[in-house]
Amino acid sequence: MGSLPLMIYANTILLLAPGFLLAGFLIIAALARRSASTAAYISIISLLAALGAALAAIILRLAHAGVPGQSQTHSLSFNWLPLPRAMAIGGTPMITLGISSGSLNLAFFMLFLFIVLLVQVHTLGMLKYKSILPDYFALGNLTAFFLVLAALSINVAQMYLMLELAVYTACCMMQWTHRPPEQPISRRILLPHVIADALFVLGITIFALHGTSLDHQLLFGHASTRMAGFVPGIEQPIASLNPWFPGLTWRSLGGVCLAAAALAKAGQFPLHTWVPETIPALSEANALLAGTLIAGGGLLLLAHCVGLLNLNAALTVTMMGATTQFCGSCIALVQKDIKRAVAWLLIAQTGLNLVFFGSGNQAAGLLGGLLTALIYCGLFLAAGTVLRASDGQRDMTQLGGVWRRLPITAIVSGVLVLAAAGVGLSGMTEIMRQGLLHVHAYAWGIGEFGKCLYWVPLMMCYVTALALARWWYLIFAGKARGQPLEEGELAVQTFPLLILLVGVMIAGQPFVDLSGLFAHVMGMPGIRHVRHIPAGFDGMLLRPLEWLGPAALAVVALVYAGGLRQADALRRRAGLNLVYRWLAADMYFADLFAVLVGLPVHVIGKAAAFLDRWVVEWLLVTLAIVIRLASILVAAAETGLNVSFWERLDRPAGTAVGRLRLLKRDRPMVYVVLALVMLGVIALLSVWVSK
């Protein structure tokens, strides 16, 4: 059997994985609507079957694929909608649906399956303490189905559609957990995604009208997983905007729109406000979103868009990532809510990965995103375990000393915190150092303004480490400040945490060489390429990154050694109190969201309602009145012709007086005949004049 048939066979087995997930969803929806535990076990079994099929396909692919990192497209792809403009350029491209089993796709495919499986196993421990409907597990399977299809997508349009469907099913899944009814979340979660959808459609429209065959391949066709940096493409200035924005081109605008849509999926500024709104949901749903869509989905989409992004779009990604990291790190440093702090830390860490990606080191950004997905999925699951044991206590200032009742959770979450801060065992230190070195070279090439793109991420790494250490210390260390915990640990909840910890420790190691794999796929050197650290103050803060986690824990322990009094006294100082209140209110992002998003949508809705009531409705009423009058006239004429006129025509009219009375009776009919005669005369005159 040749290599190509074996590859097709491997891809066919790979397609069984989403098939098992869809089958699990259908079985739960049809047969397990009454028992949550039965639905949970069906979901886990289907996920295990999908994981087994994926592993079998990957083993077969590694044995016969040949070139590592090469994209292999399934032979049963479906071509749809030939594009006329692209055909006029010289080819016959179509919108293509199918799967792509390249190394980058498979890495995130396995990541998504792995995380969803561990999250569903962790949810089993919640069934005894919280009422969860079976539809929650069915929708979890459906979300996983869309996520794995997104990871295997053959082009950008298909990937974005699958990620969008995953967002909608995840929102439905969050609604199936009991929450206070006065906390609606779907509208505030979905609205930024609707804006991102509009930006994505605008971006692909620009590329479809002003693009090349490469643009079509990446957007709609057989997209190669091997990228070779940023492609300049056709630079066509926008004439109407060029006087105000001299450097703006059609390709820049299209790339910025696509990048903004991907950034929204990753929870980045300014469409990041949907991530904290997911906090009222179940912790396992937060972990699923954190590990798949936020940390992984947005980066994977950007990786497939990299051939469409020129320098302007790349700079946009870098700036938005740095802004989000700054906001998220500072806000997380003052949060009291156990899950809200993790959510802000998640988008801050994702922002740092996007800074690496936008500055040109895509391998560091992708590997950092993979590790971020595993770490913050574990932190959300640990938060869920603490919430279950503390009967829903979300205020970290009312916890403390939790390690006595939850020792395994405390140890695992502590190691994950150190890994996120940059301890060498996870490989995150080397990712951060090499990524920041690349950002340094990128920023110094831009100029004075560009240096902020280096200093902001570097300083925020220190703030993020402090926020992570503060989160762990307030929950697990010190003395108990609130009610003592009555519940202990469950094996079904500690097992996923241990597996995630092992995954974090393995994924960043050199013998796994995921960084080399991503670097090969993206067409660039690996992140472990030795580079000289800058001398002076530029490199002084870059050298001690491996000590960042322990140093942050030591600082936090000194601040909270005597309880919360010292920290409260520090917070109540005049200047710091103002900053604290500003950060505790999420930098008033709720008001910003209301002004930038809520107000325009409200105005558009009011305008649409006004047009519907006073314009469209009156047009319809006027049209109905005209049609009604016309129908009355036609009915009257038809009655006169069919009954009155012909009946009287058959009877002799008698005298001249009788004929006049007949005409008087049939006056409407006379008017109709006269009108027809006049129209005929006008027609004859017009013909004569034209001659």
Image (cartoon, rainbow, N blue to C red):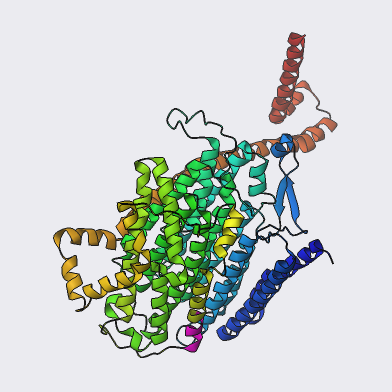
Which corner quadrant of the image does residue 213 belong to? top right
Q: Nearer the viewer, residue 458 or 609?
A: 458
Q: Position of residue 53 (x, y in %)?
A: 69, 74
576 left or right of 307 in image: left
Q: Nearer the viewer, residue 537 or 553?
A: 537
Main structural element of the magenta stretch: helix, strand or loop? Answer: helix
Magenta residues, start to end: 490-496
Place of residue 343 in the rendered image (x, y in percent of width and height, measured from the top left): 40, 66
Picture coordinates of residue 170, whole percent (x, y)? 53, 67
Q: Position of residue 24 (x, y in %)?
A: 65, 76
Residue 143, by quadrant, is bottom right
Residue 495 is one of the magenta-drawn residues: yes
Instruction: Identify the image quadrant of the N terminus.
Output: bottom right
- Say which residue appears at 39% left-offset and 86% top-offset: 406
Q: Is residue 349 left or right of residue 526?
A: left
Picture layout, residue 55 above or below residue 262: below
